[in-house]
Amino acid sequence: MNKKQNGTAPEHIINEFDEELRNEMNEIWLLAGSTAPDVQDISPIEVENGLNALNTRLEISGDYIPAGDKIAGWIQNYSRVLVAAVALITLTTFFIFVPRTAVVPYGEMATLDLPDGSFIEMNSGSTVRYSRFYRFINRTIELNGEAFFTVADHGHPFIVKANGVSVEVTGTRFNVQSWADDPAGETIVSVEKGGVLFYPIEKRDQMVTLTAGESSRWNPQQLQPTAPETSNVEDATAWREFRFVFRNQALGSILRDLERRFNITIELEAHGVENSPLTAYYSQQVQLESVLDDICTVKGLRYTRTTTGYRIYRQVD
């Protein structure tokens, strides 16, 4: 015989639950009785056993913690560990992949000591980068600007990468001039002592070998650096003594050198002369306006002071 559940839940079952849950269990019992389909009679013992099994599976007891609370508690307990782990990973990544960088401001010069005993004298406005694993894995330096290198002997070759070219040595003294903003994109290498290999990056077969007293040039339009030629290295490194030596150098390039050395802006408002070559030699330190006087005299120009530096222009009759 079939029948539907009616009335409240049996008292011996309700008493199995905490007091605050008993009213809710009665409502559930009544709702189930009003909606459940006809079923065969179930004994009170079977009902009790079923509810006890459900009670166990749902962990409805004094020790029960809802899943959301468990997650929140886990996060709270381990948040400090997680933060520390993330910080450690970030720091390790920074240490491995971010190179050391040295930047010399305009108007200043600096010397950078390297871990292997080598050192670099850097001209105004120059930037040098190298790996935090320098000496252990390789001795590769990235340069934008001008620097004089004194390289210590070591098992790993010392390599300078500068705007498309490489200079490779084992132990020597040499100068590299290579500015990313140079109009001609030219790199000049001059060797004072020892020898270097000079070649376009990834084209080592196009190398030239330079020895003491020789120099070579390269720009992106060349397949190979120029053949070694005898040069006065003291002229190439005059900047180390705060002197200026220009040998057939483009006027625009000279003005950029002056801007970096004196940390000032020079505007050239004379179209067509920026690539005009100029040769000048100063045997001692000189003031900026003395150099500007000479440039304007030779090129038929004039200059005037501005709020940010100087302006060079053509004289109009």
Image: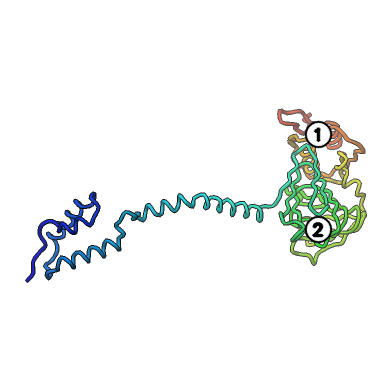
Q: Which residue is mark 2?
A: 158
User: Alpha-carbon neighbours of circle 1 within 10 Å: few (<14), some, or many (≥20)?
Assistant: many
Q: Which residue is mark 1?
A: 301
x and y percentages locating residue 145 in the rendered image: 77, 47
x and y percentages locating residue 286 in the rendered image: 87, 34
Chain-order first, disc 1 or disc 2: 2
> What secondary structure is found at the residue carrying circle 2?
strand
103 up-or-down from 218: above or below: above
For the residue pair 137 and 241, the one nearer the viewer reads as 137
For the residue pair 143 and 99, the one nearer the viewer reads as 99
Residue 273 shows in the view: no
The amino acid type found where label 1 is placed reads Leu
Where, by quadrant of the figure, is residue 272 drawn? top right
Which mark lies nearer to you, 1 or 2?
Answer: 2
Instruction: Please report the residue visible at 13 percent of the width from the left and 66 percent of the height from the top.
Output: 37
- In the picture, the quarter occupied by the N terminus is bottom left
Q: With 187 as the anchor, is 63 left or right in this view?
A: left
Mark sitting on residue 114: none
Q: CA distance from mark 1 to mark 2?
A: 45 Å
> What secondary structure is found at the residue carrying circle 1?
strand
Instruction: Please report the residue visible at 86 percent of the width from the left and 37 percent of the height from the top.
Output: 298
For the residue pair 196 and 141, the one nearer the viewer reads as 141
Instruction: Report the number of numbered marks.
Output: 2
Residue 61 shows in the view: yes
For the residue pair 132 and 198, the one nearer the viewer reads as 132
204 up-or-down from 257: above or below: below
